[in-house]
């Protein structure tokens, strides 16, 4: 079994309220949490309106599938989040 932990830091320039921050992040829990191989949570930057940090834990039986799913999540984030992905770090356990 392979486990990948991927942390994504996102910049939200001009974000003025917590409500706007939630809207701009667009329901990451609902989108990615539906997949039984993925767990997702907001892991940092709770107090900052102009930044957000999310951690994804991806589990699978084959390393290429886990890495592929991580890449897919990263690509979708780049396209769908109303912000700018500043940093992505991955760790394979």
Image: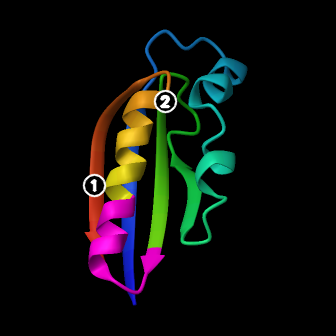
Identify the residue at image location x=49%, y=29%.
81
Residue in view at x 69 percent, y 48 percent: 30
Q: Is 60 included in the stretch rendered in magenta?
A: yes
Q: Is residue 13 magenta?
A: no
Displayed quadrant of residue 36: bottom right
Residue found farthest to the bottom = 1
Query: Dot 1 surroundings within 10 Å: few (below 14), some, or many (20 or more)?
Result: few
Overall secondary structure of the magenta section: helix
Q: Identify which residue, 42 or 75, lies in the foreground.
A: 75
Highlighted range, magenta: 59-69
Q: Nearer the viewer, residue 61 or 42?
A: 61
Q: Which residue is mark 2?
A: 80
Asked if 10 appears above or below 57 in the picture, the reply is above
Q: Which mark is residue 12?
A: none
Q: Helix, strand or loop at disc 2?
A: helix
Quarter of the rendering occupied by the N terminus: bottom left
Q: Where does residue 50 sit, x and y in percent of width and height?
A: 48, 22
Q: Quadrant of residue 10?
A: top left
> How crowded is the residue under tag 2: few (<14 C-alpha within 10 Å), some, or many (20+)?
few
Left/right placement of residue 54 relative to residue 23 reads: left
Quarter that holds the C terminus: bottom left
For the point 36% across and 59% down, which residue is it? Answer: 70
The residue labelled by disc 1 is 89
Q: Position of residue 92 (x, y in %)?
A: 29, 75
Whether residue 93 is visible here, answered yes or no, is: no
What whole-number distance in Å separates the C-alpha atoms at marks 2 and 1? 19 Å
**In the image, what residue occupies the spot 29% across and 79% down?**
63
């Amino acid at each position: 079994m392979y486990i990948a932990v991927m942390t994504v830091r996102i910049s939200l320039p001009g974000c003025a309220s917590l409500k706007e921050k939630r809207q701009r992040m667009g329901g990451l829990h609902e989108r990615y949490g539906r997949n039984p191989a993925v767990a997702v949570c907001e892991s940092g930057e709770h107090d900052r309106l102009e930044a957000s940090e999310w951690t994804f834990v991806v589990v699978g039986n084959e390393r290429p599938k886990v890495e592929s799913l991580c890449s897919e999540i990263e690509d979708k984030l780049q396209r769908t989040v109303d912000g700018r992905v500043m940093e992505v770090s991955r760790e394979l356990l």
